[in-house]
Image (tube, coloured by chain):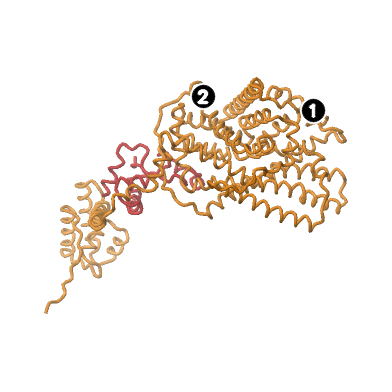
Amino acid sequence: MLNQLVGLFENRENGLSLSEIARAMQAQPSAVLAMIELLVQKGKLIEVGPDGKCCTTCGLQSDCNLLAARGKRYRIAP
Amino acid sequence: MNTPSRTFFRLDYGGKLERAIARLMAGFDENDFDAGRYPRRWLAIKLLEADADILSRVQEMPNGAQVIALAGQNAEYLKSMLGDEVDLLTADRRYGYINGVVRQALQRPLIDRITLTDRIDDIVTHKWLGLPFFFAIMYVIFRLVIDVSAPFLDWTDMVINGPVAHLFSFLLDLAAAPAWMHFLVVEGIVAGVGGVLVFVPGLLILYFFLALLEDSGYMSRAAFVMDRFMRIVGLHGKSFIPMILGFGCAVPAIYATRTIASRRDRILTALLVPLMSCSARLPVYVVFGLAFFGARAGTVIWAMYALGILVAMLAGMVFTRTILKPDVSSAFVLELPPYRQPALKSVLIHMWENTREFVRKAGTTILFASLVMWLLLNLPWGVDHQRDSYFGKVSGMIAPAFAPLGFGNWQTSGALVTGFMAKEIVVSTMSQVYLRGEEVQSTAPLSFGAEVLNMGGGFVTAAIDSGRILLSILPGVDLVPADQAPDDTALSLALQTQFTPLSALSMLVFVLLYVPCAATLGAIKHEFGTSWALTSAVYQTAVAWLAAFLIFQGGRLLGFG
């Protein structure tokens, strides 16, 4: 399952969102989230901003309307 | 007699992992390691996973160090063979097993896959229907803002120019304040700040509907739909997200361009964001709309918003082909969240926070501007006519530039110049200039009790009228008498003597497009430097002048003047 999840990120420069991953895995987002968190914790995936770039490193992240509205995305760790 | 058998569940982790687990369990015996209260297989798996808590506990146990070393060797071997750490390998097997169980145990009807969200999206994000749907929604909202808020707008106007002005007069009389203080407070502060606060009901309703759109999930769809449209005219699709924010205020919208990766795209977006009608312009639209366009005020205001978007598209095309040629295009990725029922509390908080900012600005920037304006309108001291004041003289010098646009008088020119500080100040300045000595003194003060009764009664009437208008939106329901039109505000009445419908339209277009306010230019300067802030100020003013010129002169040629 984890390998299948990591495989989804191939050729996805802008990463994938939780719901996109869940849709591809045909599972509920809540079921996929634990897997994603494990992969992030293990350094396999990184969290990125809504546009697929690293805007999550921005200091204004907690106030960012876009991030709040559009949610995090994930990308394969470089 | 049969004894009930207990079957323990054991997940199979696959050949290599299972062999490593078995080796480690054998190692427990070889090293005389007693697992104690821990199940041996479970402990072996945790040691292979290098679970920090278990490692520290086993370290304390007799012969624990040897067992940990053995587990480490096995884990390294597995990693070299399978390419991943053991905890990821075991998690993968567990999730795989869970997935298998769920697939066998749970059958999802195929119809569930096509959710209500998908069905709605088929319409609202449709290739051809999406854009008309977006504009139709915006049209309905602006009609609601104008029509439903109109009774409250009249009520607020009555309260500010009646009881509030009378209260200040009364207090100043009590304090035996000099005559100039009366003028300053009643004609300067109450007329200036009050002229802006009159529009709070309209803003509350506007923000209520914008919050509904946002919370329901439609705003993301609007961005998606506009993305397609913007690409047709050669713009970057990501630009529309900050532009949507620009409908509230351009300053946070400029900072929101930070999410765009390319500097060129950020600059282009920042140059276009101020063309979106921010809420500060709404008071100008409302006062002119009600004064000159009556029942069609909502349509005119909607047209202003649509025109802002259209001009932004055209300006984007020009910039894209001249000073901001596109670099490598990147994909626009936008997650469309499922639709959900907006939470009333969240909508009300959103509505209040935005309106509070408007009211706060009225109490600071506009109050200060009103005081300065009052001084400039009354200096040199004792001046008989405002036209001879410092403000009147300077405005009179600028006025000829606006003559071809249909509003070449010193009052309007001065109001437009002060609008550079904040767009709402256009209305507050006009209130000071046009309402001087008219509104407040024309109404005889009532007793305190009568004023309170008037206010309460007026509010109830406004609420009933608004409710009728709202219900009349429903097909087949008409609760509004045909001859009932919203009363003009004091300022609207004054403006009717100075403008024609054509020159009013020209004025609205100029206010929509001309130089962004100081705070917006400050944000552009902060993000991109002085030259781009100047570019924004110059190009917008030039576009505004040209557009207003074309409307006014074109309208006259067509016989509308």
Say which residue appears at 61% left-offset and 40% top-offset: B279
Query: Color of chain B here?
Result: orange
Going by the numbered disc 1, the residue's amino acid type is Lys
Q: How many marks?
A: 2
* Residue in front for this viewpoint, B345 or B376: B345
- Residue B172 in the image: x percent, y percent? 84, 50
Asked if residue B503 shows in the view, the reply is: yes
Question: Disc 1 designates what residue?
Answer: B393
Going by the numbered disc 2, the residue's amino acid type is Phe
Say which residue appears at 60% left-offset and 27% top-offset: B540
- Do callouts 2 and 1 mark residues in contact (Cβ within 8 Å)? no
Is disc 1 on the same chain as disc 2?
yes
Q: Chain of mark 1?
A: B
Taking the view exactly as shown, the residue that stands out farthest to the bottom is: B1
- Residue B554 in the image: x percent, y percent? 63, 21
* Residue in front for this viewpoint, B112 or B393: B112
Query: From the viewer's perspective, is B152 left or right of B266?
Result: right
Task: Give the spatial CA distance, label 2 vs label 1.
Answer: 38 Å
Q: Residues within 10 Å of mark 2 (few under 14, many from 20)?
A: some
Query: From the viewer's perspective, is B556 left or right of B82?
Result: right
Question: Disc 2 designates what residue?
Answer: B319
Q: Earlier in the sequence, mark 2 or mark 1?
A: 2
Marking on residue B487: none
Q: Which chain is red?
A: A
